[in-house]
Image: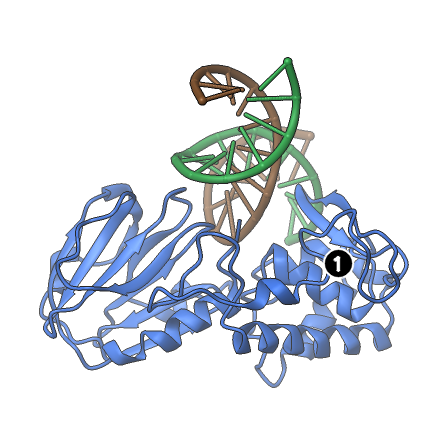
Chain colours: A blue, B green, C brown
Amino acid sequence: MWLPELPEVETIKRTLAAIQGQYIEEYWLYTPSALKRQDFLLSEIKGHQIEDVRRRGKFLILDLGKDRLLVVHLGMSGRFYRSVPKSPNEKHLHFKLLLTSGEEIRYVDPRRFGGIRLIADENDFFRNLGPEPWDDDAPLKLAQKIKRKRSPIKSMLLDQSVIAGIGNIYADEILFRAGIDPRRSGMELTDEELVKLGQEMRLVLEDGIAKRGTTFRDYRDGNGQRGEFAASLAVYGRQGEPCYRCRTPIECVRIGGRSTHYCPQCQH
DNA sequence: ATCCCGTCCTGGAGGC
DNA sequence: TGCCTCCAGGACGGGA
């Protein structure tokens, strides 16, 4: 199992850098429901140049210029990658682009939680998304929001309007490295803990990007390669196994409907 | 407003 | 072995 969170989407973005400047020659939408929003006609993308490939939170953005954006969200099992030209269509292929270079970009998503969107106004579409973790003011904004809320800190890290890009795996890893119990209410965190949380958030995500993301089974980057962060996971998926720091068995509880892994000894 | 929960979906895991 | 059931999880919408 795996989740495309910020480091995975960032990895995909980087491996797709080579498609910048290329033109869209043709497209295929095999699963109409995969197109979640349509500010303009899909047929318009034909002939457009991919001027830029960006990431915002867990969204991948192909900027086609002139307020024409193709935004992709990978949900929990999605892949978005360059494929060998003319290789046969695989199962769960929902959308495909043919570029003038002859290479193809494919969107494959077995569980169909993800989707693509045609966006005309980027600022409007992302207006409710929280700051990027590396924004200068992100740790401060994060701390301010956390302090005012009663919900468990784990749930707040997953809230995309609080901070962009963190999912279930990295939330657990960040809280472990910050030494904070995931069940604690945001309001009761000390200023010291909030500073530590902001620092560890960046460090864990940077580590994830450096290792090209977490691969359990499905995940591949834009070139179809696996990531290596799974070997670095300290708590996620390790319930019952000894903590690497103190040997206490890692526990798993449900918080806000999500499985949450933590060390009862190292996290307070 | 805010929080919580159900819904979507499929493949993999576990039970018998 | 094979079949069945359960479960994971992000975003979103509805209800309390």
Which subunit holds the residue at mark 1?
A
Q: How many marks can you see?
A: 1
- Observer-nearest of A255 and A38: A255
- Mark 1 highlights which residue? A153
When the figure is inspected, residue A85 is found, relative to residue A75, above or below; the finding is below
Furthest residue toward bottom: A136
Give the residue at x 48% y 59%: A4
- For label 1, count other residues whose C-alpha is less than 10 Å away and answer few (under 14), some (14-19) or many (20+): many
- Among the 4 quarters of the image, the one containing residue A199: bottom right
- Observer-nearest of A222 and A95: A222
Q: Give how far across and how far down residue A211 sits, in percent.
A: 54, 74
**Residue A151 in sight:** no
Q: Is residue A89 left or right of residue A190?
A: left
When the figure is inspected, residue A73 is found, relative to residue A113, above or below; the finding is below
Q: Amino acid at mark 1?
A: Ile
Q: Give how far across and how far down residue A205 sits, in percent.
A: 60, 73
In the rendered view of the protein, which quadrant contains the C terminus of chain A?
Answer: bottom right
Q: Is residue A64 left or right of residue A115?
A: left
Q: Give how far across and how far down residue B11 sits, in percent.
A: 42, 39
- Observer-nearest of A28 and A110: A110
Give the residue at x 38% y 77%: A14
**Residue A83 in sight:** yes
Give the residue at x 54% y 78%: A210
Q: Give how far across and how far down residue B7 sits, in percent.
A: 48, 30
